[in-house]
Each structure stands twice: as C-alpha cells, then as structure tokens.
Amino acid sequence: MEKRRFERGAGVLCHISSLPNKYGIGSLGKEAYEFVDFLERSKVKYWQILPLVQTGYGDSPYQSVCCNSGNPYFIDLERLCREGLLEKDELESAHMPEGRVDYGRLYVQRYALLRRAYARFNIRGKEFEEFVKSGAFDDYALFMSLKTLYGGTFREFPDAYKFKEELAISEFRENAYAKEYCFWQFLQFEFFRQWKELKSYANSKGIKLIGDIPLYVAADSSDVWAKPSMFLLDEDLNPTEVAGVPPDYFSATGQLWGNPLYDWDAAEKDGYKWWTERVKRAYELYDIVRFDHFRGFDRFYAIPAGALTAEVGEWRKGPGIKLFAAMERAVGHLSVIAEDLGVIDDGVVALRDKTGFPGMKIMLFAFDGNKENEYLPQNIIANSVTYTGTHDNDTALGFVEGMDEERFAEFRKLLRAALRWEGVSYPLVSRKDAARAVVKCALATKSDICIVPVQDILTLDNSARMNTPSTPSGNWQFRLFGMPSRQTAAWLRNAIKSSDRV
C-alpha cells in the first residue's frame, strides 16, 4: 500500500455536541463557524470530531442507528428558521439552559420541533428528490419509519418487515412515503447539506477535518437489519457472538460491548463492498479518518451471546491487509489514523506497519517511571499522532488533581525530565501548571500530528470529562459555555509556533 506522511501540525478534539449555543446541544450553526475561526487564529491545522452519527440508546456516538447517518440534533435550527421552516416563536421554544447536554429533554422536544419544520418542507423539490432517489438513506429511512410505528428493536417487527421481504417493504415505503419515510430523509438531507458547507468553510481556512469510524455497529441498527448476511447472526437475526475485550489490568471481567460481530468470510466473498461503501462515504465527510479499535482488523475477540461478562471468549483472525487493500482500490489513497491503544500484539503492529498508518500516543500514559514507555517523548516516532488524552480519558487537569501529594511529586519529576529532553521550559508549581505542561510536552513531540482536546486547552477539570468507559450514564454531555477567548487562542498559537507546528 502507498505510504504517505501527514503534514506536521496541531489539532483540536472537540465534538459538535460540545459546541455552545442556546439550544441544548452543539450544532452546525454559527458557533461551529466561530470555532473554525478560533482554530484559524490559533494556527491549528486539524479539527477532530467524534462520529457524526444519529445516536441510539445511551446517546453514544459509538452506538448508532445507522453508521452513515448524521445526527439530527446537530441541524442548525436558526437556519431552518431563515429558510421559513420554523417560526420565531418555535425557535425560541427550543431554548435550553447552558451547560451539559440533557438528552432526555432533547429527545422529547427536538424531534417534535423538527417534524414541524418538515411539515413546511417541499418534498417535491428537485434537490431533495434527487437525494432520496440516490438511495443513500433508503434503509435508514425505512428502519426509522418502522421503529416509529412498532417501537422496540427491529427483531420485534412483524416478520415481513423484520426479514425485509421485498414486496412488503415496497408497499410500506409507498404508504409511509410522505408522512414518515421522507421525514427521516429530510433530516439527513438537511444535516449533510449543512455539514458539507461547514467542511468547505474549514478547508478554506486551511483546516482539515478528522472523523471517526467505529469498528462495530449497534445490534439494533439499520446496518444489521439491511445486511444481516454481513454479521454472525442466527436464523432469528440475533447475534450468535458479540464484541468486547477480555479481562486486563483495567477490568477484571473485561469489557462486554454487545455489538454483533462481522462475518469476515462473507465480507471477503462480497469483495468487502459494505466496507468500501462505508469508507467512500466517510471520505465525503472527512479529510482524514480515524479507525477506532484498529486491533480488531487483525484479530477480534468473540464472546458467546448471552454472556454476562467478557471473561469467556476467544480471539479470531480478522480480515487484515486484504480489507485495506480493497478500500484503497475503491477510494484511492487512505488518509488514516489507527487507534492502536490498549493491549496490542505483534500482529497488530505488523498490520499497522504494512498499511503505513500512524498509530496513537497518549501523553497522560507516559509517566509511570518506565524508561521504555512507548508514550515518552524520546520513544515517539514521527509517523504517529500524539494526544494529551482522548475522549475516553480524564482531562489533563482532572488526571493530575486525582493524584495524592507523593504521586504528584513523582509525576512532576518525570514530566520535568520529559520537557528537558524536548528542550522545553515550563513552570510546574501548581497542578494547573502541570496540566498545561502536558499540552506543551505533547506538542513538542516528533509526532507529525498532535491533537489536544479542547478541555485541555482550557485547562478544565474532571467535570469536563467526555466519557468514562464501562459506565452506563453521565457520558457525552460535556459542552462549552462559550467560545475560547482570544487570550486562549494566543496561548495556543504561541505553543504551536514554539513546537514548530505552524
């Protein structure tokens, strides 16, 4: 495979949901454009986001009703108002308090408001009709229409719909076309029109978008419903085995994710068509794609369906380099970041090296006293992407505030040594100083790209954490109260310049 390096630069991780506005969750509206302007002022070259998808149960962007969908919550309501699809009083009714996202309230209020907008939308418009005829969201619109009618999971649909019988589905589409089917098409039409304009604006400012492709899809999704042959399911379309990871240092019982596993033999026979189509769509949205749980492409962990923990399971061989070769034939050069964190083996390393994809380095993991630690600056290679932390980690300040005095003293000693090795000078008096120094240390590494979560740029504490893995609630709710200040932009710009990332 062709191997290319990324331009040296700095990036910021901030999901769309975390942007500030008056409507309870970040959107593709004016605040997104203001955030791009902040990035430009700061000399940032990369903006990384989490999956843009419509979330399902649990509100996780890694559990979606459709892996190629856009989240309707992100649609800019003010734009719908300007287009005459919402009245001003309806827009005002959507105002919600600043701060954390209240998904329960959003679910009740937002879809009702979007249905009002749809009632005024012309479904006979040429652009919309072409969008529907493309078929890109036919399965999604059918799936969501059926869920609206029957509730529950798709396994509870009447058999003719559950098994997607052609005649029954055709009749249902026709009957539900104007009222329900086109409503879900409308949501995707509006989302992607707005997203592509935002991406174009960011690109015009010299900023590239980094997006995420989760390895697995949700069990109750249009993906599994529409293409059951691509997954390991029984005759009733229930997963026979599910995804997760075995017990390790972090979890005595492992992590039971519950996603259905792919039938990689069937995928290979089909020429990996489902995957290549998925990647084609990803590159319509992003400039660079991060493959989540990259190790699963080499070997994946299979847990019997119905298991209560991930303690019993077995490793199976994944598609390996054949999948990425098929993707490259379909879309050309792959601009990819491989999420290779956690316990990885020689097979994963070999696959990453064959593809030439840069792996990830986490600065918060570097300071355990082990000189061979792969995340220490002196052990980081250029073809990599360094983060202070990811959406699954505590913030840098939260991390150091969680240390007792003895551990913090040791941490400062190790951090000071790393900074000295990089030729960086920074005060380490307070815990806030230490958190800022972690950012400086990450920026100074050899990695071609360094990504800093917006929480660490603002030196926010544990209350700003995005996600705590294996916890069922309280996640994905972080939101900015306002745009980062010009002083913050100046600090970041100077830090980027001093690390030779301009």
Image (spheres, rainbow, N blue to C red):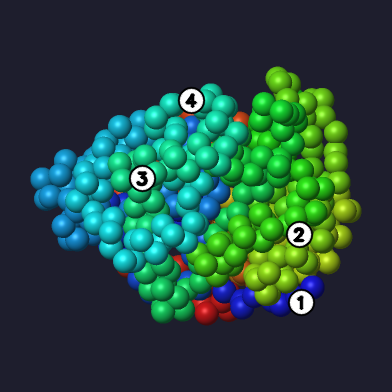
**Which residue does the image show at 43% across and 26% down from the upper left?**
150
Tell me the amino acid under the disc marked 1. Answer: Glu
Please, is residue 299 above or below residue 131 in the view? above
| Residue 208 seen in this snapshot | yes
Instruction: Identify which residue, 334 or 22, lies in the foreground.
Output: 334
Q: Position of residue 267 (x, y in %)?
A: 76, 51
Label 2 or label 1, whichever comes before in sequence order: 1
Instruction: Identify which residue, 166 or 120, lies in the foreground.
Output: 166
Q: Position of residue 68 (x, y in %)?
A: 53, 53
**Which residue does the image show at 77% across and 26% down from the upper left?**
304
Mark 1–mark 4 Cα distance, whole angstroms, equals 45 Å
Tell me the amino acid under the disc marked 2. Answer: Gly
Mark 2–mark 4 Cα distance, whole angstroms, equals 33 Å
Label 1 or label 3, whichever comes before in sequence order: 1
What residue would you read off at disc 3?
Answer: 177
Instruction: Identify which residue, 222 or 405, lies in the foreground.
Output: 222
Residue that lies at the very extreme toward the front in this rendered image: 167
What residue would you read off at disc 4?
Answer: 152
Which structural element holds mark 2?
Answer: loop
Please, is residue 398 above or below residue 496 in the view? above
Left or right placement of residue 118 versus residue 270 in this view: left
Instruction: Identify which residue, 173 or 264, lies in the foreground.
Output: 173
Tell me the amino acid under the disc marked 3. Answer: Tyr
Q: Nearer the viewer, mark 2 or mark 3?
A: 3
| Disc assigned to residue 271 | 2
